[in-house]
Amino acid sequence: MNVYDSSRIADMLRNQGYEETAKQQDAELVIFNTCHIREKAAEKLFSDLGRALLIKQERAAEGKQTVIGVVGCVVQAEDEQILKRAPFVDFAVGPLMYHTIKDILQRIKENKTHEGEVYTDFPAESKFDYLPENKAQGACSYLAVQEGCNNFCTYCVVPYTRGVEYSRPVEEVLAEAKRLISTGSLEINLLGQNVNSYHGEDKNGKERDLAYLLHKMAELDGLQRLRYTTSYPADMTDELIDCHRDIKILMPFLHLPLQSGSDKILKAMNRRHNVEDYLRIIEKLYKANSELRMSSDFIVGFPGETDEDFAKTLDAVNKVKYIQAFSFKYSRRPGTPAAVMENQIEEKVKKERLEILQNLLFDYQDKFNKSCIGRVLPVLLEEKGRHKGQLIGRTPYMQNLHVETNSANLNKIINVEVVEATTNSLSGKEL
Ligand code: 5AD
Ligand code: SF4
């Protein structure tokens, strides 16, 4: 979501006459888009800001002004505190207030601003209404269809930093998709913190779900690949599951976070699914499309997690055999219910559990990648590789794949026979 937001902010700035620079040293304006999901992500901002200050000072010595802005969820959570810790920041704007950036920059230009403007409202209007029309920046595009979250998992800051759920109207999504396709997108990934609870209005004011939106997207001329992320297990409806059978351009790879394999922990996390429900959904998905493969997020060391609970997470991984997954040590986030739960888990235990879980996850990822050797996969080539004549792309399963091919194939889909595989990438030869 932050990648999408950053690109929309860049669109807005381009309309204002700004251009991207290759080096931060050359930039008159630097904006940090921030994540507050775990402590480590939030702390990264302050070390990055320290480096930006040095550059700002060097540029000032050459008589050049540098405006530094911070946007995103850290701003929402820290508010004015950001300016206390980094007083050289010129403005700070929360994730629903990006539209204010344009006017702030104008005020700075005209010297009409006070030091450090901060905006962290949750406006009722959609932030999307203010953003300018966008163009594809490559063959793969993100498209946010839903923002915010009402699920309130007890560990998570998102409902507090991104606010309540909001779904963009169907027509607005389709118009953005058409623009992306006409400017070069072959693949669109529909985004939302809880994307499968999408309930945007159609042109008659009727609420429509994600399954409806996926069918509408699939009718668009020129779109070759469709994905959606991130989904909440309890919101996987039968209609949505059927899309994996009926929509040919829907890629056979689904991110469906389980978080923990223990029902006791899932309950304490306030997740509205237990392990059995989750496995049942996966079974239905496989029945709809036997090519489908899964990925997930996991948190280890949630308060109260015993060795037995953790073993159940490993059991679930052994059952689903995820081909990719993200796993994290539980991070205490101020203001969330889990942060004040008793029985917090020691750092040492979290570290041990994470290592065990990641080793198991990597094993399955490695096995799946190796099982692709000899298969012919369509690959969307997204960037140049390190070696001349090499391009890097993604398979339908989101694996990175390197291939020697004509550079004119950049941003195209070609068929590749997989020749080699490691845990993190594949390589192959063009057919
Ligand atoms: N600690 C660790 N991981 C977290 N996530 C969300 N909040 C926390 C937290 N407090 C993870 C979840 C979520 C992913 C985006 O980040 O697994 O699915
Ligand atoms: Fe956070 Fe996702 Fe839970 Fe929403 S569903 S509270 S975004 S983990």
Image (cartoon, helix red, strand yellow):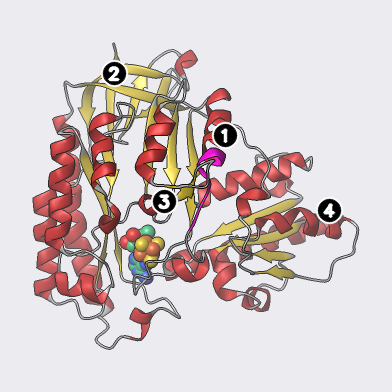
Q: Mark 4 points at which residue?
A: 64
Secondary element type, mark 2: strand
Q: Does the rendering let one see residue 363? A: no
Which of 376 and 360 lies nearest the eye of the viewer? 376
How far apart, in angstroms, are the residues tagged by discs 2 and 4?
49 Å
Q: Viewed as shown, does residue 279 lie left or right of 138? A: left
Question: Around disc 4, counting alpha carbons within 10 Å, would you say few (fewer than 14), some (14 to 19), or many (20 or more)?
Answer: few
Sequence-earlier tag: 2 or 1: 1
Q: Give the range drawn in magenta.
A: 166-172
Secondary element type, mark 3: loop
Question: Around disc 1, counting alpha carbons within 10 Å, would you say few (fewer than 14), some (14 to 19), or many (20 or more)?
Answer: few
Mark 2 vs mark 4: in front = 2
Q: In which quarter of the image is residue 124?
A: bottom right
Sequence-earlier tag: 2 or 4: 4
Q: Quadrant of residue 264?
A: bottom left
Q: Name the residue under label 3.
A: 198
374 versus 141 height, above or below: above
Secondary element type, mark 4: loop
Secondary element type, mark 1: helix
Q: Residue 416 carries which label?
A: 2
Sequence-earlier tag: 3 or 1: 1
Residue 334 image point, x, y percent: 45, 80
Q: Viewed as shown, does residue 101 lie left or right of 357? A: right
Name the residue rendered at 15%, 39% in the picture.
Answer: 286
How far apart, in angstroms, are the residues tagged by discs 3 and 1?
17 Å
Mark 4 vs mark 1: in front = 1
- The amino acid marked with disc number 2 is Val
Residue 370 image point, x, y percent: 16, 33
